[in-house]
Amino acid sequence: MDSKKFSHISIQDTEAVKLYLKSLIEALEKKQITLSSGKEKMEMTVGDLCRVSIQAKKKGPENKLSIKLNWKENGKLMELSEDDVEIL
């Protein structure tokens, strides 16, 4: 089984973050995500079902929001969940 990793960390203003998120939405609609930074590049085909993990942490002035998506390219990862989360 092939194993690849892609990692990118940077400091961006909120407008740039919005563009990243919009690009991610467009990629999910196409079911094809391509990530690139410098010489690194990774392509992934998105499956029909995704596990969504949202975690938030606040400690004084420090804030952290993590959104994680997991899926299998060909096959179902799990059954659909009935639990929803609201982001306002």
Image (cartoon, helix red, strand yellow):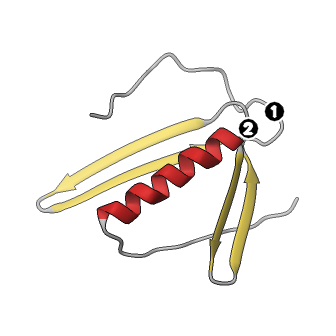
Q: At 85% across and 63% down in the image, what residue appears? A: 2
**Residues marked 2 and 1 touching at CB (< 8 Å):** yes
Residue farthest toward the left in the current orientation of the protein? 60
- The kind of residue tagged 2 is Gly
Q: Nearer the viewer, mark 2 or mark 1?
A: 2
Dot 1: element: loop
Foreground of the two, 44 or 70 = 44
Who comes first in sequence, dot 2 or dot 1? 2
* Camera-nearest residue between 12 and 8: 12
Which residue in the structure is indicated by mark 1?
75
The x, y position of residue 34, in whole percent, is 69, 60
**What is the residue that sits farthest to the right in this orientation?**
1
Q: Residues within 10 Å of mark 2 (few under 14, many from 20)?
A: some
* 49 lies left or right of 11: right
Marks 2 and 1, how far apart at CA: 7 Å
Residue, disc 2: 47
Task: Identify which residue is drawn at 27% across, 34% down.
Answer: 88
Which residue does the image show at 64% across and 39% down from the upper left? 29
In the drawing, what numbered circle is on residue 67? none
Quadrant holding the N terminus:
bottom right
Across and down, in percent, residue 71 comes to 68, 41
40 relative to 76, above or below: below
In the image, what residue occupies the spot 65% across and 71% down?
36
